[in-house]
Amino acid sequence: MGRSYDLWKVDFDADCLAMKIARSAGARQLTGLKISGHALYHAAYLALNVEVLDLQIVAGASHILGRVVTEADHARSMRNITRWLQEEIGSFCTTAQQASTLLQSAVLGLHDWDQADSFHFPWCLYLCTLASWVFHRGLDVTAENQRLRTDLPSLIVTVTNCSNVNELAELSGRYCPRPLAAAMAQQLATVRWAVVHDAMKVLVGLS
């Protein structure tokens, strides 16, 4: 399934390049198309490798699609995410790298957000932020003071530049992800959509 996503992205990027060369679309339209398409690509990879409901619940979401999150829900999601972190190294590393790649593009192009004109774009950023938060923080609260403090760009780039799974896995739990949660919460606060507003409040709690 992941391979099919990769092949789709190759075709998508080729089409975007052809549109740019042929000037069959305006710069604003093309930018919005690429932002929307790449967000879907990375979010699809994330959903393939981890249950997004579990990510939201362990991050502190109190409601999911209007349904109250119970203590039993939280306990189950904690078990699922803990098992994911401990037993599916390739899966959580792939998720972290895909999430960081989208976040890097978003941070580099903050001024382009309004050109995306896609309701799913901020939601994809929210899910990718949660995936990165879980990857960097892990679930060991007692290790909070042992994590390295770093700036937001370094936090994101260190993951996207890893060449293999083992190198990437060594970064898990090493850096403090609070700057990332805070920055994304601030950005999502500008989105006028109730679901994203609730997501923003979850990120504020993480930061």
Image (cartoon, helix red, strand yellow):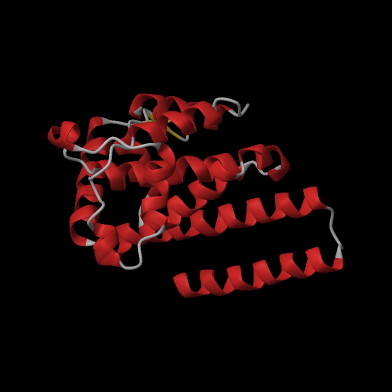
In this view, the residue farthest toward the left is 142
- Front residue of 120/112: it is 112
Which x, y percent locates residue 61?
37, 31
Q: Is residue 185 depicted above or below 163 in this figure? A: above
Going 66% across and 67% down the picture, which residue do you hit? 13
Which x, y percent locates residue 171?
26, 52
Going 84% across and 53% down the picture, which residue do you hit? 26
- Front residue of 195/39: it is 39
Q: Is residue 155 visible?
A: yes
Location of residue 63 (image quadrant): top left
Figure label count? 0
Q: Is residue 1 visible?
A: no
Going 73% across and 69% down the picture, which residue do you hit? 15
Q: Is residue 38 depicted above or below 22 in this figure? A: above
Location of residue 90 (image quadrant): bottom left
Going 29% across and 66% down the picture, which residue do you hit? 165
Q: Is residue 207 left or right of residue 8?
A: left
- Front residue of 174/67: it is 174
Which x, y percent locates residue 70?
28, 31
Q: Is residue 90 left or right of residue 87?
A: right
Which x, y percent locates residue 141?
17, 34
Q: Is residue 161 depicted above or below 154 in this figure? A: below
Q: Is residue 117 left or right of residue 44?
A: right
- Front residue of 76/176: it is 176
Quadrant assignment for the C terminus: top left
